[in-house]
Image (spheres, rainbow, N blue to C red):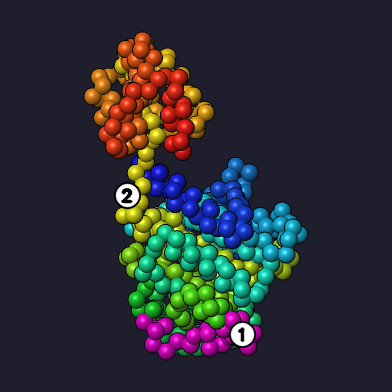
């Protein structure tokens, strides 16, 4: 029922992303499980709780893809895309699977559009990626969105920070949930992803923030990102707790949220992942990207999309069996020569029922053709918006509609 909304939104997204020079990449529905364990991180919610994984008959461990950054990186490495040009700009619109508790804006099969830009560590490209997301939402007329941004620095600052975080959290470990107690030893940064209120309160109290541990280069990079955002007039909110729930991020992290979404308020999220290509076996290649929930965009657009009711150009009302061959020929010519959407009535019903159907299908015109029309070589054409009807010679129908597109 809602396919026409998806089509219209997807069309606009394809066209806007292409305007930035990104080319579409398509990857398989499933990958080897190890790709996500190594790429996304075994302590993340996505990998530890949400993947649909199985063993195939050849004993391979496979997983329906829960996100697209790792598969795109795998493909980038496998097809040696880095040799093509210094910066590779790729984008996707695809279906993904996460075994989460379904609710508004959160499905087990959902769709993302997103971009991944490989080959530059410059802050300009972080800002390009953020502006692709921001401008797509703007082009859909979305207000009330907030760009939240942070820098989690380069990986070499992390051990010092994580040590401080553990020192702070250890004495309160009884207040942490079971998962976070485990994370405290394995991957303490992931405690920021926890939905448990006690864990979040503990972090809010006096936990050290990674932004206080950035190197001078990290700071310079982040300042430049913010400067360029200012320059482009993209408003943002600094959120020093925004570490994002996937292990591959370095430096810039960001999310765009909407007040219209309720508890699942992230329209999109992304950031830099300068080490992932190397970590998965490729040449060291800095990269940055984002991914955005299609369903969440559709929720926010719900009202404006109602106006996009599907419409057809011409509905051919057929009265009597003998009019059928001529009607089918007219329909064929209109489609072939003028590329119009033409629907013919198949059921030999009365004129009233057929006109009602033309209306229901939101037809711009109805062409009425019966046995009398065949004899007189004229058909009646009704403009369904104006309600006006004219007689047109059968041989002039193409000419009559030639200006419709
Ligand atoms: P993510 O934050 O896991 O990031 O997902 C990105 C967006 O996908 C979310 O902000 C949300 O809009 C949508 N989303 C996620 N899970 C669901 C769900 N279960 N149902 C509906 N929508 C959902 C990533 O996936 C990273 N790969 C983004 C990225 C690209 N980072 C760098 N490049």
- The answer, for residue 41, to whether it is visible in the render is no
What residue is rendered at 42% in x and 19% in y? Answer: 394
Left or right, 179 with respect to 277, comes to: left
**Would you identify the image quadrant in which residue 381 lies?**
top left
Where residue 83 appears, as percent x and y from the top left, is: 76, 59
The residue labelled by disc 1 is 220
The residue closer to the viewer here, 71 or 337, is 337
Overall secondary structure of the magenta section: helix
What residue is rendered at 37% in x and 39% in y? Answer: 311
Where residue 360 appears, as percent x and y from the top left, is: 29, 34
For mark 2, give the secondary structure: helix
Residue 211 magenta-highlighted: yes
Q: Residue furthest left?
A: 352
| Magenta segment boundaries in residue numbering | 201-224
Q: Nearer the viewer, mark 1 or mark 2?
A: 2
Vertical side of 236 occupied by 366: above or below: above
Where residue 232 appears, as percent x and y from the top left, is: 52, 74
Vertical side of 233 occupied by 206: above or below: below
For mark 1, give the secondary structure: helix
**Would you identify the image quadrant in which residue 392 lies?**
top left
Disc 1 or 2, which lies upstream in sequence? 1
The disc label shown at residue 306, or none: 2
Q: Residues within 10 Å of mark 1 (few under 14, many from 20)?
A: few
- Tell me if label 1 and label 2 are in contact, CB under 8 Å: no
């Amino acid at each position: 029922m809602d396919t026409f909304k998806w089509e219209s939104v997807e069309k606009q997204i394809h066209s806007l992303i292409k305007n930035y020079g990104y080319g579409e990449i398509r990857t398989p529905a499933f990958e080897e499980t190890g790709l996500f364990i190594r790429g996304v991180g075994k302590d993340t919610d996505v990998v530890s709780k949400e993947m649909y994984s199985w063993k195939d008959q050849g004993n391979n461990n496979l997983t329906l893809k829960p996100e697209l950054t790792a598969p795109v990186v795998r493909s980038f490495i496998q097809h040696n895309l880095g040799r093509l040009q210094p910066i590779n700009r790729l984008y996707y619109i695809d279906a993904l699977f996460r075994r989460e508790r379904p609710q508004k804006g959160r499905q087990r099969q959902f769709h993302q559009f997103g971009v991944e830009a490989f080959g530059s560590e410059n802050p300009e490209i972080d800002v390009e990626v953020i502006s692709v997301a921001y401008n797509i939402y703007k082009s859909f007329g979305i207000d009330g969105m907030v760009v939240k941004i942070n820098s989690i620095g380069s990986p070499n600052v992390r051990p010092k920070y994580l040590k401080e975080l553990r020192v702070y959290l250890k004495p309160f470990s009884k207040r942490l949930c079971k998962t976070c107690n485990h994370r405290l030893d394995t991957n303490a940064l992931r405690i920021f992803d926890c939905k448990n209120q006690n864990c979040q309160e503990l972090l809010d109290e006096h936990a050290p923030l990674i932004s206080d541990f950035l190197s001078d280069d990290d700071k310079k990079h982040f300042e430049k990102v913010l400067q360029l955002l200012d320059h482009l007039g993209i408003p943002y909110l600094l959120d020093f707790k925004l570490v994002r729930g996937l292990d591959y991020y370095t430096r810039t992290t960001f999310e765009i949220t909407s007040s219209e979404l309720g508890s699942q308020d992230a329209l999109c999220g992304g950031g830099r992942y300068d080490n992932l290509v190397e970590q998965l076996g490729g040449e060291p290649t800095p990269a940055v990207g984002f991914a955005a929930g299609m369903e969440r965009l559709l929720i926010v657009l719900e009202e404006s999309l109602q106006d996009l009711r599907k419409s057809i150009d011409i509905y051919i009302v057929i009265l009597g069996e003998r009019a059928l061959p001529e009607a089918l020929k007219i329909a064929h010519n209109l489609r072939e020569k003028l590329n119009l959407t033409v629907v013919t009535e198949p059921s030999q019903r009365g004129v009233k029922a057929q006109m009602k159907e033309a209306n229901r299908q939101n037809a711009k015109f109805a062409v009425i053709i019966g046995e009398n029309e065949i004899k007189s070589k004229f058909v009646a054409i009704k403009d369904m918006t104006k309600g006006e009807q004219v007689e047109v010679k059968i041989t002039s129908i193409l000419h009559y509609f030639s200006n419709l597109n």
